[in-house]
Image: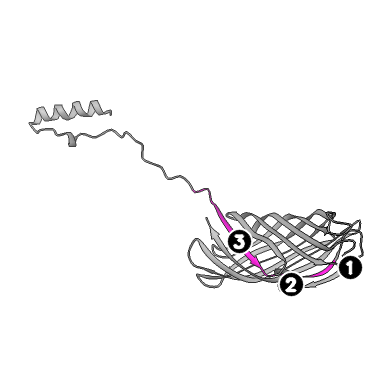
């Protein structure tokens, strides 16, 4: 029944019964439909910038020279570190997840030469970049804990530039670098110990253009609220790549410390 008919009926009843009719007694039209709750997409997002105090050991060879063995703790690396960026992100919907892990470091060092004839000094700049993109499926989850089987691919880039200053080679620079991709598979998981404290970690292994590529980590986290958590743990990552005299067979390992922000 529309509003005009309702008004006419109410007016007729008022005339027949002698009961006055007020505007409030007449049903009002609904000008704006009642808002219907929009279904949640189900996706949740998290981002975690982190600090990794990693040292490095292994064999590195560039510029066609024989590979040399390196043993550098984080203190050695830190004094020559120009810039570093590390972050992990994740999107999750029920049992499905998509994640990424990016690491970039730039290290510079320099020294004088004994005689200063060919060059007065030599500067060396080294850059390392690794980006992992993957997808996972939870084989176990109970609302607070989960264990995911994951697959993905990691892109590596490592390069070194040597610059000469002064002497006969003044202004000359040479560089050597390689980019490669490896397939990865393994697991990622989280286990809640209490309402606020949880364990997390992952284990990945793969190969491709590298002979071997692996990555393991374990951490403990504390959830301050629904949005913010802090994590601390230990991570080790290794890759064995060689091609045409370029060798990058190294293991990086050390403590990690980061924040997790949920959206």
Above or below residue 91? Residue 20 is above
Q: Where does label 1 land, which residue?
A: 115
16 vs 173, nearest the viewer: 173
Q: Where does label 2 land, which residue?
A: 76
Q: Where does label 3 land, which residue?
A: 49
Residue 178 magenta-drawn? no
Please tell me how crowded label 1 is: few (under 14), some (14-19), or many (20+) other residues with Cα within 10 Å.
few
Of labels 1 and 3, the one closer to you:
1
Query: On the picture, is 29 further left or further right than 91?
Result: left
Q: Position of residue 192 (x, y in %)?
A: 56, 69
Of labels 1 and 2, the one closer to you:
1
Q: Residue at x 68, y 70 (%)?
A: 53
Q: Which mark is residue 95?
A: none
132 vs 85, nearest the viewer: 85
Q: Magenta segment, which residues?
A: 40-59
223 vs 188, nearest the viewer: 223
Residue 48 magenta-drawn? yes
The answer to which of marks 1 and 3 sits earlier in the sequence is 3
Rendering quarter of residue 81: bottom right
- Secondary element type, mark 2: helix
Q: Residue at x 72, y 67 (%)?
A: 80
Above or below residue 169? Residue 74 is below
**Marks 2/3: CA–CA distance:** 23 Å
Q: Position of residue 213 (x, y in %)?
A: 79, 62
Q: Position of residue 70 (x, y in %)?
A: 82, 70
The answer to which of marks 1 and 2 sits earlier in the sequence is 2
Q: Residue at x 54, y 62 (%)?
A: 143
The answer to which of marks 2 and 3 sits earlier in the sequence is 3
Rendering quarter of residue 146: bottom right
Do labels 1 and 2 touch, CB within 8 Å? no
- Secondary element type, mark 3: strand
């Amino acid at each position: 029944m529309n509003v005009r008919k309702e008004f006419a009926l109410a007016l007729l009843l008022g005339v027949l019964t002698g009961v006055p009719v007020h505007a409030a007694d007449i049903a009002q039209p609904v000008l704006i439909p009642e808002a219907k709750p929009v279904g949640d997409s189900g996706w949740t997002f998290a981002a975690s910038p982190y600090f990794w105090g990693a040292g490095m050991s292994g064999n590195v060879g560039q510029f066609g020279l024989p590979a040399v063995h390196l043993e550098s703790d984080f203190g050695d690396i830190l004094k020559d570190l120009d810039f570093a960026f590390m972050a992990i992100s994740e999107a999750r919907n029920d049992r499905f997840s998509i994640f990424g892990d990016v690491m970039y470091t730039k290290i510079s060092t320099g020294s004088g030469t004994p005689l200063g004839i060919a060059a007065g000094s030599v500067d060396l700049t080294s850059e390392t970049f690794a980006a992992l993109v993957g997808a996972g499926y939870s084989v176990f989850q109970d609302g607070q804990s989960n264990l995911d089987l994951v697959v993905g691919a990691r892109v590596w880039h490592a390069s070194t530039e040597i610059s000469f200053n002064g002497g006969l080679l003044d202004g000359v620079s040479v560089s050597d670098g390689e980019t490669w991709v490896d397939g990865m598979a393994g697991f990622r998981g989280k286990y809640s110990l209490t309402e606020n404290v949880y364990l997390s970690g992952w284990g990945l292994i793969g190969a491709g253009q590298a002979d071997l590529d692996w990555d393991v980590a374990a951490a403990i986290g504390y959830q301050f609220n629904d949005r913010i958590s802090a994590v601390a743990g230990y991570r080790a990552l290794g890759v064995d790549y060689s091609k045409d005299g370029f060798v990058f067979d190294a293991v990086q390992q050390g403590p990690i410390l980061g924040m997790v922000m949920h959206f």
